[in-house]
Image (cartoon, grey):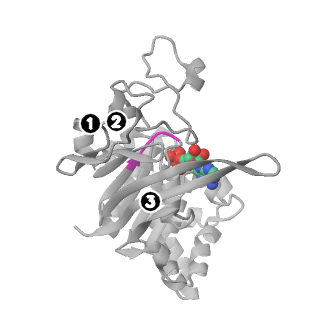
Amino acid sequence: MAEILTVDKACVYFSIYRGFPKKLVGQIKAVDNINLSIEKEETYGIVGESGSGKTTLAKAIMGINPLDHGSIYYRHEELNELRKRDKKFIYRKIQYIYQDPSSSLDPRKSVKDILMEPIKVHNLYPKEERLRVIGEILGAVDLPPSDFMSRYLANLSGGQKQRIAIARALLLHPDFLILDEPTSALDVSVQAKILELLDSLKKRLNLTYLVITHDLSVISNVTNRISIFYLGHTMEKGKTYDIFREPLHPYTKLLLSSIPIIAESEKKFKPSGVPTIEGEIPSFVNLPKGCRFSTRCPYVFDKCQSLEPEMKEVKGGHYVACHLY
Ligand SMILES: Nc1ncnc2c1ncn2[C@@H]1O[C@H](COP(=O)(O)OP(=O)(O)O)[C@@H](O)[C@H]1O
Ligand SMILES: [Mg+2]
């Protein structure tokens, strides 16, 4: 299988300034030495709690967040080194669907205007054909054009807005879609329908997906392979089936057990009688020495607090970064 996207030792750091005059007080290593490669026409998942660096990596792939170290390749071309014209073309082929369609799509615009925008920016299709193309793409995301073409975004439901965001991405004939929490803003009843639509589009158009989510049911249903993120770092990666059947990293085991992980600060919301795994998620500024999960890990031993574990291949294609292996 050919690789379509490769992330090689990628790091994205944010500097934190405080006071007046501004002083550098620390650095958030939101993406810290991430490696992954995505094969053509697979669905790859990134799973992790809120704040683990998922969106930061997506934005690095899109060129929105510059890398501090490492490289990202699309079809073996390093994105950073592309000339402007090639970049514009490649960022038609890679499309990013933002976390929340309500905030990424202007509510004052009509569906037609939203969909016309990328067509104009990239100067696609002859003028007299553009409305027909928009009608077709609305049909492809199951929104009848006669009903939706002139509706305003503010008057659409969450699921309908997500369909518009998908339609807008598809207009540019991408082959790789990054879907950032594609269902988290939607009602449960609508979530399955959006996943079904994404699956049928993928098969029809031979798309490759990177799905980012904290929702394990989404991941287990739609992905072939996954990376488990914790504080900007990969703890485990491999085939989704293998990881769900036999999780290796203590953190993955915690995630997959149905036990809610409750941070110290949220303890007051803890329903009584429910077993929980406790412990504050450490802050990025004060990352624990050694393994970043060592402060919460039930199996912690000396080495974990001094040496960061390297990623090891434990079984064919199943990797873990943990001193227990
Ligand atoms: N532009 C930014 N400036 C400073 N910190 C940021 C910025 N973007 C993200 N972060 C921080 O990086 C960390 C990872 O955030 P994010 O990638 O959004 O996590 P996720 O998508 O997994 O919830 C968080 O601590 C967040 O506050
Ligand atoms: Mg996010």
Residue 9 vs residue 87, the one in the foreground:
9
Q: Is residue 232 left or right of 131 when viewed as pictured?
A: left
Main SS of residues in magenta:
loop
Amino acid tagged 1:
Leu
Residue 323 — which label? none
Q: Position of residue 325 (x, y in %)?
A: 23, 37
Residue 61 at x, y = what percent?
Answer: 47, 64
Which residue position holds label 2? Answer: 252
The residues tagged by marks 2 and 3 sit, at their Cα atoms, a distance apart of 22 Å
Q: Kindly indicate whether the residue at mark 1 contacts the one at mark 3 (C-beta within 8 angstroms).
A: no
Could you tell me residue 108's position as x and y percent?
72, 61
Circle 1 residue: 248
Some atom of ligand 1 lies within 8 Å of the CB belonging to the residue at label 3: no
Quarter-wise, where is residue 161 in the image?
A: bottom right
Which residue does the numbered mark 3 point to in the structure image?
Answer: 10
Which stretch appears magenta? 46-50
Mark 2 element type:
helix
Residue 245 versus residue 183: which sits nearer the camera? 245
